[in-house]
Amino acid sequence: MNKPTLDHIGIAVKSLDAAKIYEALGLTVDHVETVTSQNVRTAFLSAGDANLELLEPTGPESTVAKFIEKRGEGIHHICFRVDDIESHLARLKSLGYRLINEAPVPGAHGCRVAFLHPSAGDGVLIELSEKS
Ligand code: CO
């Protein structure tokens, strides 16, 4: 099993127009995609080895909409790319960490993703992602 690598930092925004500040910094939006399983529209900006993922809720039922309502816009999660998501989830669960997704769900870029419960990361929402 390879070491996980930082894939992206997820940022909750009311609108993907929030990309403007990063574009002003010289980054570019490489990919925009609606992820129906998460009720979000995402924009990815490559920043070297890792990316920024802007998350705009597609409706009030989106967990990102609820996040913004409660905590305002800002950093929402960090995501590690792993090469065997099932074994990571099984090991974390056996170690007693709470998972939001016990099995991977479809993410952006055709990846399979799973979120740990924020309590597992001491307030940091951690996403695991495996490229298909
Ligand atoms: Co993400």
Image (cartoon, rainbow, N blue to C red):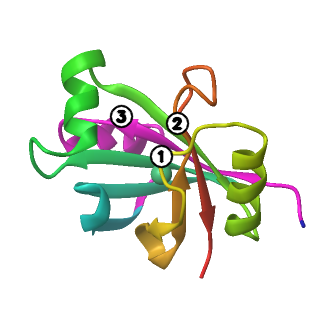
- CA distance separating discs 1 and 3: 31 Å
Q: Which mark is residue 100?
A: 1
Other-residue count near label 1 (Cα within 10 Å), few / some / many at <14 / 14–19 / ≥20? some
Magenta-drawn segment = 2-29
x and y percentages locating residue 42 in the rendered image: 32, 56
The answer to whether mark 2 and mark 1 are in CB contact below 8 A is yes
Residue type for callout 2: His
x and y percentages locating residue 115 in the rendered image: 52, 48
Q: Nearer the viewer, residue 126 or 29?
A: 126
Residue 35 can be seen, yes or no: no
Seen in the picture, residue 25 relative to 38 is either above or below; the reply is: above
Q: Which mark is residue 117?
A: 2
Query: In the structure shown, which secondary structural element does the residue marked by tag 1 occupy?
Result: loop
- The residue at 27%/36% (across/down) is 13
Among the two numbered marks 3 and 2 on one chain, the one whose residue lies closer to the N terminus: 3
Magenta segment: does it hold 11?
A: yes
Which image quadrant for residue 88? bottom right
Q: Nearer the viewer, residue 26 or 115?
A: 115
Q: Is mark 1 within 8 Å of ligand 1?
A: no
- The residue at 35%/56% (across/down) is 43
**Residue identified by numbered label 3:** 21
